[in-house]
């Protein structure tokens, strides 16, 4: 049997971090078993589905590197097929038209809740011949006896009595199909063998299995993944937790896609004490049977740590590629300054995110307007002015602007003035970087370049003069 998994988001917003983990688990399962991973856009909610949301989902999948083998398929392109299945169910007696008014349904539910019963449709129209010409919905005729057994790969065996299920609506009054119908038809037509999805869908699964049986379709294997909770233990919500629930926001915050995937795969799954996994290792080691059946909470500290490991270990070319996006947001063109690969190698161990890395790389490419008195006051003093004047004179005479010659000038200045190295290096570093975290002084000056270095020392001397006055 060919393994075929799917990810089927609804385009009513961004790609949610919980959805991304579900997509990852489905993708890994397909890749491990040499199967196919299908992307399906469940866009039948015409009021809430938007093209912007579709683009956000596709953008998030692309950024994460979760390549799909087939799709994206759009449910709005398949309405004829859904109508065909609905007609089939009606004709074979597994569905019926229902013309119960909203008022009757509301009254029924109020009475049931007053009796402390589970609100559900009472099957009033099961035995009525409702005309197709009058306003109606179509309901699936759920079996009244027996049970549905779900051998879930994560939760184990789940048994639901058919008597607990009501006759759900599979077609609305306007003729549009509902979720539980479309997902069943799609999984059947797309030959989905394994459905890996959030456990918020577990209540839908017995209903969908009954519909699959009614249309003579094979039953997929199900795995219901527990939800992801916020750090405060609450359910993740955009209203409460802001944009942090969006995959694209993680890109905006400066995370590498591999780091986020590594973090997501460890939310509810583990392999011994290993924390860092390459994509190949994830494919090789991940097993959906080993996913924990309880919810996992976001841990930003762990994600930051992981991201920093990737910043340190990934090839500088790769880091530079992703860093360019964040530099662009700071209105910086990396081609106007030092080699970005050299800057990445010099600075990457000082940052946990690409956003932080971009911030501490700005001074290599863009001049700053001045100095912060609280930071500069300690080093840019009247005592440091002659030191800076001396070192600027020596740096001006350098013909070959290299680390070794820069180092010799700084060291020679300290020796000539009878000062410890720090008395020269600290005011010089402050003058050139403005106080931004930076690598060794000779490397910093080399990357900043001769012209900018001399200009900034001159600016530091003017700052000292102003404050002396």
Image: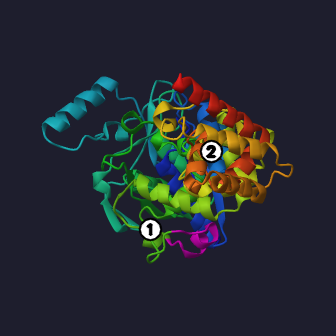
Q: How is the image coloured?
A: rainbow
> Residue 459 lies in magenta, yes or no?
no
Considering only vertical position in the picture, is 75 above or below 205? above
Q: Is residue 24 left or right of residue 142?
A: right
For the view shown, which residue lies furthest in the right direction? 399
The residue to which callout 2 is attached is 428
Q: Quick check: marks 2 and 1 in contact, CB under 8 Å?
A: no
Q: In the image shown, does 48 or 60 lie closer to the viewer?
A: 60
**Residue positioned 65% across, 49% down in the render:** 63
List x then y, in percent, for residue 279.
62, 66
Q: Is residue 455 above or below residue 144?
A: above
Inter-mark Cα distance, 2 to 1: 50 Å
Looking at the rendered structure, the secondary structure element under dot 2 is: helix
Q: Residue at x 39, y 58 (%)?
A: 226
- Dot 1 surroundings within 10 Å: few (below 14), some, or many (20 or more)? some
Q: Quick one: which residue is furthest to the left in this view? A: 115
Q: Can residue 449 be spotted in the picture?
A: no
Considering only order in the chain, which callout, 1 or 2, is on the residue closer to the N terminus?
Answer: 1
Q: Is residue 274 left or right of residue 409?
A: left
Q: Residue furthest top?
A: 469
Q: Nearer the viewer, residue 319 or 33?
A: 319
Q: Which mark is residue 220?
A: none
**Residue at the location (31% across, 46% down)?**
234
What residue is shown at x 46% (from left), y 42% (from top)?
244
Q: x and y percent of residue 47 in the render?
A: 52, 27
Specify the label residue 269 is tagged with.
1
Frontmost residue, 198 versus 374: 374
Q: Which residues are magenta?
A: 276-287
Where residue 310 sits in the image (x, y, percent)?
59, 61
């Amino acid at each position: 049997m060919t393994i075929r998994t799917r990810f089927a988001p609804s385009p009513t917003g961004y790609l949610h971090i919980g959805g991304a983990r579900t997509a990852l688990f489905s993708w890994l399962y397909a890749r491990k078993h040499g199967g196919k991973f299908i992307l399906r856009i469940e866009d039948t909610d015409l009021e809430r589905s938007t093209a912007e949301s579709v683009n956000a989902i596709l953008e998030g999948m692309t950024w994460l590197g979760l390549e799909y083998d087939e799709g994206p398929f759009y449910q709005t392109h398949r309405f004829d097929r859904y109508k065909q299945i609905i007609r089939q169910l009606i004709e074979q007696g597994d569905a019926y038209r229902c013309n119960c008014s909203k008022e009757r349904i509301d009254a029924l539910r109020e009475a049931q809740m007053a009796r402390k019963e589970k609100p559900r449709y009472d099957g009033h129209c099961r035995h009525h011949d409702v005309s197709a010409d009058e306003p109606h919905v179509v309901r699936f005729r759920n079996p009244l006896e027996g049970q549905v057994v779900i051998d879930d790969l994560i939760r184990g065996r789940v048994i639901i009595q058919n008597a607990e299920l009501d006759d759900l609506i599979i077609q609305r009054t306007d003729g549009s199909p509902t979720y539980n119908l479309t997902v069943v038809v799609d999984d059947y037509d797309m030959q989905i063998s394994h459905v890996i999805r959030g456990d918020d869908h577990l209540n839908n699964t017995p209903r969908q299995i009954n519909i699959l049986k009614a249309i003579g379709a094979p039953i997929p294997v199900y795995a219901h993944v527990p939800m992801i909770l916020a750090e405060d233990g609450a359910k993740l919500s955009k209203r409460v937790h802001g944009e942090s629930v969006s995959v694209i926001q993680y890109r905006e915050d400066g995370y590498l896609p591999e780091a986020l995937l590594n973090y997501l795969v460890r939310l509810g799954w583990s392999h011994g004490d290993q924390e860092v996994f390459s994509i190949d290792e994830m494919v090789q080691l991940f097993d959906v049977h080993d996913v924990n059946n309880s919810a996992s909470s976001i841990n930003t500290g762990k994600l930051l740590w992981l991201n920093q490991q990737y910043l340190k270990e990934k090839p500088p070319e790769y880091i530079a590629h992703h860093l360019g996006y964040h530099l662009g947001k700071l209105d910086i063109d990396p081609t106007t300054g030092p080699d970005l690969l050299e800057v990445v190698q010099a600075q990457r161990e000082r940052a946990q995110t690409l956003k932080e890395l971009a911030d501490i790389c700005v001074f290599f490419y863009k001049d700053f307007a001045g100095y912060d008195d609280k930071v500069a006051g300690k080093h840019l003093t009247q005592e440091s002015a002659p030191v800076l004047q001396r070192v600027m004179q020596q740096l001006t005479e350098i013909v070959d602007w290299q680390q070794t010659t820069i180092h010799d000038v700084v060291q020679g200045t300290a020796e000539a003035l009878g000062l410890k190295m720090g008395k020269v290096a600290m005011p010089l570093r402050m003058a050139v970087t403005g106080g931004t975290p930076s690598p060794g002084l000779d490397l910093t000056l080399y990357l900043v370049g001769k012209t900018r270095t001399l200009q900034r020392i001159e600016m530091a001397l003017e700052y000292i003069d102003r404050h002396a006055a």
